[in-house]
Image (cartoon, rainbow, N blue to C red):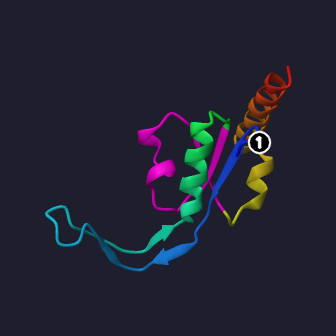
């Protein structure tokens, strides 16, 4: 992380849970079904990049379970929803604009570091 100027977190399905429980046995127990979960590395690397104040681009598969880095209600960065069945969306606005904006922030971070 110390040698980069920006981070792109790509949240895609790594695990599909067809059923389970959160906080089992507690008063807050909740049943869940059909939940798609990304790699834990998305959370770890995203948090590291945030702590280093790197420009963050967070791309989240639309159907992923929302928690941590992928929960827009607990932080200030933008999460861009992506649809794996439409790879061309990356070349169209608004997705293209989000990516171009992030690239510009990475460039600024780089040029600031070499002055």
Range of magenta residues: 56-83
Q: Name the foreground residue: 113 vs 59.
A: 113
Residue 19 location, x and y as percent?
36, 79
Q: In this orientation, does residue 1 appear? A: yes
Quarter containing the C terminus: top right
Q: Name the foreground residue: 8 vs 83.
A: 8
Residue 64 location, x and y as percent?
51, 62
**Residue 86 lies in what quarter of the image?**
bottom right
Residue at 55 percent of width and 46 percent of height: 47
Residue at 79 percent of width and 36 percent of height: 103
Residue at 46 percent of width and 48 percent of height: 71
Residue 97 location, x and y as percent?
74, 37
Crowd rating for badge 1 (residues with CA inside 10 Å; few <14, some 14–19, many 20+): few
Residue at 54 percent of width and 54 percent of height: 43
**Residue 44 lies in what quarter of the image?**
bottom right
Residue 1 is one of the magenta-drawn residues: no
Instruction: Name the side, left or right, on which 106 lies relative to 11.
Output: right
Badge 1 is on which residue?
A: 4
């Amino acid at each position: 992380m110390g040698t980069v100027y920006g981070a792109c977190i790509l949240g895609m399905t790594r695990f599909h849970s067809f059923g389970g429980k959160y906080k089992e046995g507690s008063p807050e127990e909740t049943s869940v079904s059909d939940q798609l979960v990304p790699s834990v590395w998305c959370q770890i690397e995203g948090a590291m990049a945030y702590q280093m104040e790197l420009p963050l681009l967070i791309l989240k598969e639309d159907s992923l379970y929302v928690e941590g880095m992928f929960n827009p209600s607990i932080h200030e960065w933008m999460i861009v929803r992506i649809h794996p069945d439409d790879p061309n969306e990356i070349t169209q606005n608004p997705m293209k604009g989000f990516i171009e904006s992030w690239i510009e922030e990475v460039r600024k971070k780089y040029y600031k570091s070499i002055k």
